[in-house]
Each structure stands twice: as structure tokens, then as C-alpha cells.
Image (tube, rainbow, N blue to C red):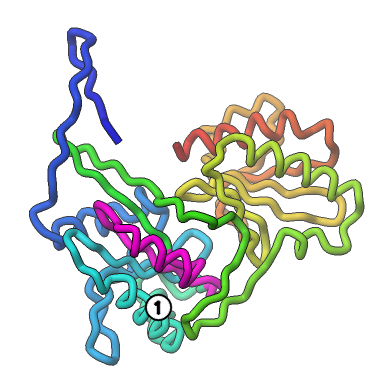
Amino acid sequence: MAIFQITSENKVKKAKIKKFRNEKELQKLFERNLEEIFGIRFLASEFVTTHGGRIDTLGLDEDGSPVIIEYKEGEKDNVINQGLFYLDWLVDHKGDFELLVQKKLGPNVKVNWDSPRLILVAQSYNEYDIYAVNRISENIELKKYILYDNNVLFVENVVLPGKKSGTKKSRKTTIVYKEYTVEDHLSNKSEKIKDIFRELQERILKLDEKINEKALKHYIAYELDRNFCEIVIQANALKIYLDISKNDLVDPKNIAEDCTEVGHWATGDCVFKVTSLEEIDYAMSLIKQSYEGKL
């Protein structure tokens, strides 16, 4: 992707691509900015496994899922298989990971083992990398970066062919994941609540084709690289959590409440309820603010 710098004469100048000196420089930059780039809390670098391997980066995402990050600055052809090996190891050694979380983040932080993630970070991927990841596992993500002059870093998701949000593929790893669907959350709910949810779901997904819908155990999340909205489907209402500060939210009707000091499963900082189709327009005006904050 071409990036252009606007000069003082209102001209544009194409930014030149440059490279990191080595893979370690790439890794250190991402680790120091892990939460800003991916919404992942940093736990450890070069984590030594019981079989003598070294996991590049370990983290915990905003949904409480364990995350392994492996970097590929040059041609490291075994990074996918190596990452899968570490992912299997991690699930077999949950106690080691949970002790690390308690040490780094505190004893009250919960780990969600339903869907551990493997993120691969590289400047480019060949067709064999993309084919392999598309076939092997839903829980592997490819991230592409480009470093430009003036220290501009561009990071994007690599869209895998045939992969759709919310669908699961057969896997060749030994890990068994707990799967949840939107229909699980709608089960036994009234037709009124289902209609409200479907309308809101459609409106959210229309904001951007890159939005991913994730059905988790306690809520349904909507994300770009990071969550911007979570929905808890209750018997008589939709509870909407937004990943934006109450102080930054323009809310003329003042329906959103700060929930940072209140225990809740979702990742958002403020919450409000939707109880009718007539409330969706206003709800979307709040949701869009959280979405735009993640662009």
C-alpha cells in the first residue's frame, strides 16, 4: 500500500519503505506497543518452554484469551509449524501460563481457554503460507506490516480466501476449542429481542466490511483489530458495551453509564440498554463513535 506525505506546499510525496535491522528490533517494537497495536497485554518475551523452545511473545487479549505471537522478518519457512507446536504446548501447560498471568497482571485476571490465538507477524507471506493457514486452523491470524520512512508503521490483517466470520474449519492440531454461535445467545429469547438484535447486528456489520463478529461465552463482540462493541442478549433487552471512555462519548441523552469500576465480562468501559427497535438509531450513533475510535 502506498503511503503519501503531504508537504507544506500541499504536495504529496510517496513514503519510501525501509526495513528493520533484524527480527529482534521488529519484536521489541511490537512488544513495547502490543496493547496499542493489537489490544493485547504483554506478558513475556522469549518464553522458554519445557522442551527448550522459545516463544517470541506471550500475551493476553481483551477477551482473556492467551496469545502467542511469532515474528518473521526474513524467510523463516517453519514459523507456521513452529507456532502451532507452541500453541499445542501452551494448551497442555495451562498452569504455567496462568501463573505467568497472575504474576504479571494480578491474581484476579481470568484466562479464557475457549479460543487461544496464534498471531504471525511478517512483512509478506507467500501463497503457500496463506494456503496452509487457511487449511489448518481458524485460530491462526496473519498480520502484515510495512515500515516507512519517518518511522511510520502500517499494520493490516491478511484476509484468507474462503474464511468467513463466525465459521469454523476442521483442524489438524490436537487442540479442542469450545465453540459458541450467535444462535446460542438467541436461544430461548423472545421474537421481539431477536428482531432488535438482528436489526442492530445488520447495522453494525454495515459500518465496515472488515468488522468481525465473535460469539463468545458471555457476549457477542464486534471488532476491527480490537473490540469496539459487545452485546449481551438479555431476556428483555440488549445490553451494549462500548470500548470508549464515558468522558469521550458524545451522549446527549446521557443513557450510557461508566462501568469501569463494576465487574462485567465484556471489555467495554461504558454500557447502556436497548429495549426497542425505535432506540436503535440513537444506539448506532454511540456505537459509531466507539468504532471510529478504533480506526
Residues rendered magenta in the picture: 112-140
Q: Measuring from the top left, give residue 21's x and y in whole percent.
A: 8, 54
Image quadrant for the N terminus?
top left
Residue 69 found in image quarter: bottom left
Q: Which residue is disc 1 drawn over?
A: 87
Q: Nearest the camera: 248 or 141?
A: 141
Q: Nearest the camera: 180 or 276?
A: 180
Q: Measuring from the top left, give residue 218's x and y in whole percent.
A: 67, 64
Image quadrant for the C terminus?
top left
Q: Measuring from the top left, give residue 134's x and y in whole percent.
A: 46, 64
> Which residue appears farthest toward the right when viewing the image?
191
In the image, residue 7 sits, relative to residue 220, either above or below, namely: above
Which residue shows up at 46% across the image and 40% down it?
294
Residue 258 found in image quarter: top right
In the image, residue 224 sits, relative to residue 127, either above or below, namely: above
**Residue 65 visible from this viewpoint:** no
Magenta-span inclusion, residue 197: no
In the image, residue 61 sits, relative to residue 55, either above or below, namely: above
Q: Measuring from the top left, give residue 283's x and y in whole percent.
A: 70, 34
Helix or strand or loop: what does disc 1 sit on? helix
Which residue shows up at 35% across the image and 54% down it?
143
Amino acid beneath label 1: Leu
Which residue shows up at 90% across the image and 46% down it?
192
**Residue 245 visible from this viewpoint:** yes
Q: Nearest the camera: 242 or 25?
A: 25
Which residue shows up at 78% across the image and 46% down it?
197
Magenta-span inclusion, residue 118: yes
